Amino acid sequence: MIRTGIGYDSHRLVVGRPLVLGGQHIPHERGLEGHSDADAVAHALTDAILGAAALGDIGRLFPDADPRWKDADSMVLLRLACDRVVQGGFTPRQADITVILERPRLAPFIPAMVEGLSRVTGIPVGSLSVKAKTNEGMGFIGRGEGVAVMAVATVEST
């Protein structure tokens, strides 16, 4: 059986935090605000994979009220979520991710994001896509206040 899940995440850009997306540190004057490292790419993908397996969401597994997850590496959280999905009888097979961010431009970092996300999830590189879009100057993203990420993932029962 093949199942599909959808994930979404958004975070505010703030001074004094590193910008981490898809496990990559992106040079920028601001980073994402959050309890963990606020990697919105990893968070959206985590929710998509968990959703496909009907295993809840990232907030249920790693609540921000729990000090263990303060400044956590979101790629580690993604790995732990994938382990839970596998224990639940599913294998992640495919993912498509769209990052919506006015700047910085992400194109130079996308191959490394795909490689890292593939390594953590077990999804083959050829079945994992990361795309970057701007919001054409509209809304909180267009004003440079934050980032949003959408992800779709499929899992297959084992």
Image (cartoon, rainbow, N blue to C red):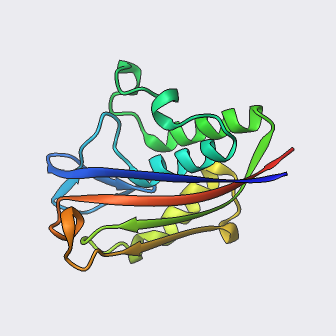
Horizontal relation, residue 54 to residue 33: left or right: right
Residue at 48%, 51% (x, y): give it.
44
Query: Which residue is at a point 25% across and 80% down the rendered structure image?
Result: 136
Question: Horizontal and vertical percent for residue 3?
Answer: 74, 52
Q: Quadrant of residue 89?
A: top right
Instruction: Give the number of marks.
Output: 0
Q: Position of residue 113 (x, y in %)?
A: 49, 62
Task: Give me the residue at 46% from left, 60% from top.
Answer: 150
Q: Which corner quadrant of the image does residue 145 belong to? A: bottom left
In-front residue for pair 120/82? 82
Is residue 14 or residue 1 the one in the foreground? Answer: 1
Residue shown at 36% from the left, 27% from the top:
64
Residue 140 at what x, y percent from top left? 19, 62
Q: Name the side, left or right, on which 49 lies relative to 132.
A: right
Counting from the top left corner in percent of width and height, residue 40 is at 39, 51
Please tell me in which quadrant of the rendered image residue 74 appears.
Answer: top left
Vertical arrangement, residue 42 with respect to residue 53, above or below: below
Q: Is residue 58 above or below residue 142?
A: above
Q: Left or right of 53: which side holds 120? A: left
Check the image and report above or below for 55 versus 144.
above
Locate the C terminus by quadrant. top right
